[in-house]
Image (spheres, grey):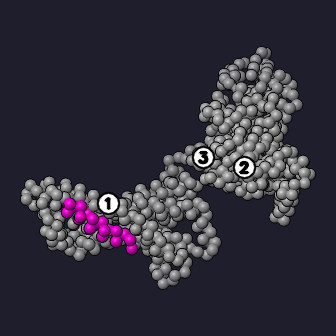
Amino acid sequence: MVKITYSENRLVVQGQLLISELENLEKILKFIDKTVMSSLEINLAAVNRIDSAGVAFLDEILERGKAKGLSVQMVHAGPHIAATIAAFSSRNLPEADSTAPPSIFENIGGWLVEVGRNTKQLLYLISDSAWFAVTGLFHKKGVRKGEFIRQSIIIGMNSFPIVALISFLVGLILALQSAAQLRIFGAGIYVADLVAISMTREMGPLMTAIVFAGRSGSAIASEIATMVVTEETDALKSMALNPVRYVLVPKIYAITLTMPLLTVLSIILGILGALVIGMAYLDIGPLPFYNEVLTVLILKDLLTGLIKSVIFAWIIVLVGAYYGFRVRGGAQGVGSATTASVVASIFLVILADSLLGLLFYFGGGADM
Amino acid sequence: MSTESLTNIIQVEDLTTGYNGRTVLQNVSMVARAHEITVILGASGCGKTTLLKNMIRLYQPWSGSIRLFGKEITDMDEPEFNHLLQNIGVLFQNGALLNSIPVSENISIPLLQHTKLPRVLIQRLVRIKLHLVGLENAGHLLPSELSGGMRKRAALARAIAMDPPLLFGDEPSAGLDPVTSAALDDLLLKLRNDLGMTILLVSHEVPSILRIADSIIFLESGRVLFCGPLKQALTAGIEEVDDFFSKGSEGRRAG
C-alpha cells in the first residue's frame, strides 16, 4: 500500500510506490496544482519499494512544483530508492515529439506532389513493362524457365470455374429479365439477339475482367508486395535481374493469352445461360436459338469484346503490379496494397469500358 | 505480485511437448530463481523458444508441470492466467509490435489497459521506457519505419512498460550491433538490480550471456543438459557446454 499525506509544505510518501499500488493520482496532482505553498519537500524516508511508475509520479510532482516557481526537493530516500530514482528519472528527458498538424495548403501541396510522384512511377512501370514484354519475346534470359506456363495456369486456368459460373448466371439473368418484356410482343426469339450481343460486346469482357481483378489482380498485387517487403525484389536487383522483367512480364504474357480465351468462354456460357431460359420459359428450341445467335453476331462484335478483354487484362496486371511495387510497411502494407489494387483496377476497368464503348460507337459507326 | 518469499519464480517439471506429433522437448525440468537473469541456450532447433512459449501458454504442453510465481499454469483458467500475465513482460523474437500504431502507443497499450494511471503519467512512463532503450526520438514513428534493431528495442520497451516482476525475452540481442547489444545488457542488469526483475532469456550470444547471466539452462536436442549457475556451468566439464562457449567466443572474435 502507498500512503501520501501533506502538511505545511511537506509531502510525506509511505509504503510501496509501485504501479500496482498507484491509484487516484489525478487527485494528488490537482492538489499540488491548487494548494498555495512556499516550497515543497517530498519526504521519502518511509518508501520501501519503488518502480518506474513511482519514479514518474515523483517526477511529475517535482515538475509541477517547479512550474509553480517553488523550490522542490526530495529528501531522505534510502540508498536503494535513490538509486532507482536516478536510474529511471524522466526529468531531463526531451519532450515527446509533437509536430503541429500540417495546414490545408501543406496537405494539398503534399497530395499534389504525391500524385505527381505516383504518376511518374506508373509511367515508368508501364514503359518498363512494355519494353521488357516486347524485348522478352526475342531474349529468353532474365526470366524463370516455364514461368509463362505456370502463370497461365495460376492466373488463367484457375479462374475458369468462377468466370464460367458467373457468366452463365449473368446470361441467365439477362435473358430472364428481357424475356418477360419481349414475350408480350411475341418477340421472345430476340432474347437470343439481346444476350448474344450484350455478352459479346459488353458483359463477357466486363464480368471476366471484374472476376479477374478480384481474383488474379489481388494475387498479383499481394505476391509482388510480399516480394518487396521481404526484400526479394532487392535480391533480384542485386543479381542483376530486373524485377519487372523477372516477375511481371511472365504475368503480362499469361494474362494477355488467358483473358481473351476466358472472355470467349464467358460469352459462350452467357449465351448458354440464355438458352436455358429460352428453352424453359419461351419454348425456343436450341437450333432456332443457335441460328438466331449466328444471324445477329458479326465478327466485329467478337473483335470488340476481345480488344476490350486484352486492354482490361493489361489494366489489371499493371495496377496490381503498381500497387505491389510501391508497397510500404510490413504485412499491413501488403494488405493495403492488395485492397487498393482491387478497388483501383475495377474502377479503371469500368472507366475504360465506358471510354472504349464510346470509341467503338462513334468511331465504328452507330451499329457498334 | 510479491516475489519476496519465493525462491523459484519459474519451476518446470518433466515437461514434454512438440508439434504435429514430433517431440521437441522431452522431460524438461528447470528453475529460474527470483531476481536473477537466467538464460536458456543451446543450438538452433533445440527447443529454446518452444520452452519459452510453453511458459506463457502460447503452446500447450503434452505432459508435465509449469509453475510461475508458485502457481500451476497448465490447468489455470483463462481469467486467472490473464491476471497473471499482467505481471509478465514478453519480448518476442521479431518484436511483434502492432504495425498500425506508432511506437509510443505500442508501449502505452498495457499501461492504458491494465492500470489506473493518469494519462500524463502514462506519457511520462512511455518517455522513460523509450529513453531506457535509446529510442527517445522514435516514439512517433510506425514500427515499419524502424530498423530491425530499433524494432527489437521498442518491443523491449513495451515488454517492460508495466515493470513486470518477470520478463521473458526471445533472443533480445540477436541482430544488434555490439554497442547496442552491450547497452541492452546494461539495461537488463539495471532492471534486475534496481527493480528486482526476474529475467528469463533465450539467447546464443555468448559474450552477452557471459556478461549478464546468473544461471543458464543448456538444452540439447530437447533435453536439459545443464541447469544451474553460470560459473558452475563453465567449470562442470560438460563437453557440449564447453564447446558452445568456446566456439561462441571464437566466432565473436573472428567476426
Quarter of the image with the C terminus of chain A in it = bottom left
Q: Residue at x 26, y 70 (%)?
A: A360
Nearer to us of marks 1 and 3 is 1
Please tell me which residue lies in front, A287 or A38. A287
Q: Horizontal placement of A286 versus A304: left or right?
A: left
Q: Amino acid at mark 3?
A: Leu
Query: How many angstroms separate mark 3 from mark 2 (CA)?
Result: 34 Å
> Is A259 included in the stretch rendered in magenta?
yes
Q: Amino acid at mark 1?
A: Leu
Label 3: chain letter? B
Q: Horizontal placement of A198 versus B76: left or right?
A: left
In the rendering, at what x and y percent does residue A313 appear?
A: 39, 68
Residue B248 image label: none
Residue B98 image label: 3
What element does badge 2 sit on? strand
Magenta region: A257-276
In the rendering, at what x and y percent does residue A233 appear?
A: 58, 67
Query: How many angstroms separate mark 1 from mark 3 (CA)?
Result: 40 Å
Q: For residue B129, say whether it is visible.
A: no
Residue designated by label 2: B26
Q: Quadrant of residue A328?
A: bottom right
Nearer to us of marks 3 and 2 is 2
Q: Residue at x 28, y 61 (%)?
A: A168
Specify few, some or many for label 1: CA neighbours under 10 Å numbering under 14, 14-19, or 20 or more. Answer: some
Label 1: chain letter? A
User: In this rendering, do the residues under marks 2 and 1 share a single chain?
Assistant: no
Residue designated by label 1: A165
In the rendering, at what x and y percent does residue A40 appear?
A: 79, 23
Cβ atoms at labels 1 and 3 below 8 Å apart:
no
In the rendering, at what x and y percent does residue B190 appear?
A: 82, 41
Relative to residue A32, is residue A53 depicted above or below? below
Q: Horizontal placement of B76 versus B239: left or right?
A: left
